[in-house]
Amino acid sequence: MDIQDKQLQKIIGLTLRGGVLTAVAIALVGGAMYLYGHSTEPVSFHTFAGENTPYASPLQIFHRAFLSPGLGIGRRGLAIIQIGIICLLLTPIIRVALSIIGFAMERDRVYVVITSVVLATLICSMLLH
């Protein structure tokens, strides 16, 4: 049982590192696309404009990044940056899911239930806004 715990801890560590590195790589690609698409626009730091509603939900972000025809490379890059941020947010959620597996392997039902409630809360808070 101890070896399985170490293996699970190693998997959790690799998942966290892989998730963060993947999120950074996706955000860098999106950032490069955004800068390429907006390289000739003047920059104004005097006013702050919030994001438009097309970038409000994960499904809309994926649609704008990959399925919207006629979208400029800059807008597509912005959506890809947000996909990187979503990947960064999913990394600790996956870690909690792996913890449930670990507690289940230890047959610790109390922590399985508690961690499942935490996971459900995280998923609901991410999907419902």
Image: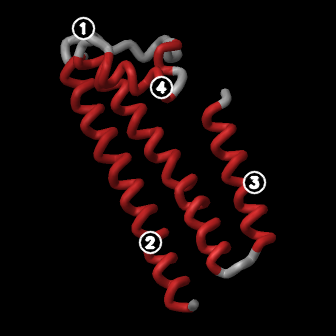
Residue closer to the observer: 5 or 53: 5
Cα distance in 3D space between marks 3 and 2: 22 Å
10 Å crowding of disc 1: few (<14), some (14-19), many (20+): few
Please tell me which residue is depicted at 53% across the width and 56% down the height of the picture. Answer: 94
Q: Please tell me whether residue 111 is drawn above or below residue 4 in the rendered image.
A: above
Residue 118 is situated, as x and y percent measured from the top left of the image, at: 72, 54
If the image is split into quadrants, where does the C terminus sit? top right
Residue with the mark numbered 3: 117
Query: In the rendered structure, which amino acid carries the disc numbered 3?
Result: Val
| Disc 3 + disc 2, Cβ < 8 Å | no
Confirm whether residue 46 shows in the render. yes
Cα distance in 3D space between marks 1 and 2: 41 Å
| Disc 1 + disc 2, Cβ < 8 Å | no
The coloring applied to the image is secondary structure
Residue 42 is situated, as x and y percent measured from the top left of the image, at: 28, 11
Residue with the mark numbered 1: 70
Please tell me which residue is depicted at 27% across the width and 24% down the height of the picture. Answer: 34
Residue with the mark numbered 4: 59
Q: Secondary structure at mark 2?
A: helix
Please tell me which residue is depicted at 71% across the width and 79% down the height of the picture. Answer: 107
Q: Please tell me whether residue 25 is drawn above or below residue 54 in the rendered image.
A: below
Q: Please tell me whether residue 82 is drawn above or below residue 7 in the rendered image.
A: above
Residue with the mark numbered 2: 11
Q: Please tell me whether residue 18 is drawn above or below residue 79 in the rendered image.
A: below
Query: In the rendered structure, which amino acid carries the disc numbered 2?
Result: Ile
If the image is split into quadrants, where does the N terminus sit? bottom right
Query: In the rendered structure, which amino acid carries the disc numbered 4?
Result: Leu
Q: Secondary structure at mark 3?
A: helix
Query: In the rendered structure, which amino acid carries the disc numbered 1?
Result: Gly
